[in-house]
Image (tube, rainbow, N blue to C red):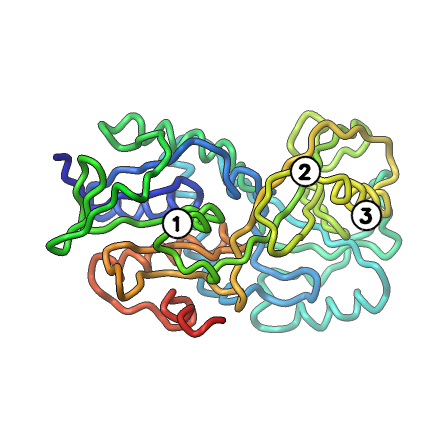
Amino acid sequence: MIEKDYIIVGLGIAGISFCEQLQKHGKSFIVIDNGEEGSTAKSGGVFNPTVLKRFTAAWNASAFFPVAVDFYHRLSEKLQEKIFVETPILRIFKSIEEQNNWTVASDKRELQDFLSSIFLKSTNTAVEAPFGFGEVLGTAQIHANNLLSYYRNHLKDQEAAILTEEFQYTRIQQKENKVFYKNISAKKIIFTEGSKVIDNPFFPKKAIIGNKGEYLTIKAPLLKLEVLLKGSMYVIPLGNDAYKIGATYSRDDYSLNSTDEAREEILSKVKSFINCPFEVIEQTTGVRPTTKDHRPLLGSLDENPNLVFFNGLGSRGFLMVPLLSEILYDYAENDIPIAKEIGIQRTSRWK
């Protein structure tokens, strides 16, 4: 029998952040992950503490932001790879009214560090921005695929730290305040499965809403962007004249099939502010795990106290997970209660 403190199921950004908490505190663990690309790998990798549709701060951004920045810098140093690249976002203004709304927002206490009060004019002839840009500070581009690859290799360098296989829920046994999976015993299993949690028989089925998002990758040699551009879609530079464009939103959808409708929506929107030739080279699809109240789900249910969930991160996972992993560790290891607004127990009231 292999004895560990924790078993972690899933290796997206939530799984990585919880692994880091366990390593920080000297706890033993094993990760079980099937190696398939999940929502972390399919994401745009935009780290943004603001909501640019309404010029507001993201929920609890003042608490999440400093912990996250420190986390990604330390993780980059640990992996010896630049996975967190601080990059401004330029938000295209659609009107004078939007400029005025931005000015008002940038003067608010919670946004002063993020929304620059100085407007920028467009000097890029490939971008239609007659009203200029607002610059968002404190933002970054996370190279998600590199992060996942490097972290998986980091775990492989540690003896028996990761198993690449499909997790079998029927092999779970619980007794004497411990949990057993095949030949592994642990204090708790932490499920960090993203949208795949819908297949977990221990998870409340109505707690997660699938939110399908599709991206296009284009080749645009004349675009020459080195920042994150936000119009009606994000334009995310990938290097070598390639850009990721998106994403769409389709609620209650867990399928990974790319659609013509999403392709046409993205193309129509990006052509409204990009006026140079480009070629579509790829279409990708992922599913964001969202909740009805747009808050994460942490903790365990009364009937299975040793099975712990870390989910419901939506589109703000990169911002939230470093602090949430600290909260979840304190809950799992020290029985410190989780705030009701992010605890999974609240789902018992949902219909």
Q: Nearer the viewer, mark 1 or mark 2?
A: 1
Q: Nearer the viewer, mark 3 or mark 2?
A: 2
What residue is drawn where x is 31% and y is 27%? 156
Circle 3 is placed at which residue position? 269
Circle 1 is placed at which residue position? 200
Q: Secondary structure at mark 1?
A: loop
Residue 244 image point, x, y percent: 68, 37
| Cα–Cα gap, marks 3 and 1 | 37 Å
Circle 2 is placed at which residue position? 258
Q: Nearer the viewer, mark 3 or mark 1?
A: 1
| Cα–Cα gap, marks 1 and 2 | 24 Å
Q: Are marks 3 and 2 in contact (CB under 8 Å)?
A: no
Q: Secondary structure at mark 3?
A: helix
In this view, 351 is above or below 267: below
Left/right placement of residue 44 relative to residue 291 reads right
Q: How many marks?
A: 3
What residue is drawn where x is 57% and y is 72%? 109
Mark 1 neighbour density, 10 Å: few (under 14) some (14–19) many (20 or more): some
Give, as a three-letter code, the residue at label 3: Lys
In this rendered view, identify the residue nearer to me: 277 or 313.
313
* Residue 309 in sight: yes
Q: Which mark, by number, is residue 21?
A: none
What residue is drawn where x is 18% and y is 35%? 183
Q: Secondary structure at mark 2?
A: loop
In this view, 19 is above or below 207: above
Give, as a three-letter code, the residue at label 1: Asn
What residue is drawn where x is 85% and y is 50%? 129
Left/right placement of residue 157 relative to residue 143 reads left
Which of the two labelled residues, at mark 3 and mark 1, occupies the earlier sequence position? 1
Residue 11 image point, x, y percent: 40, 40
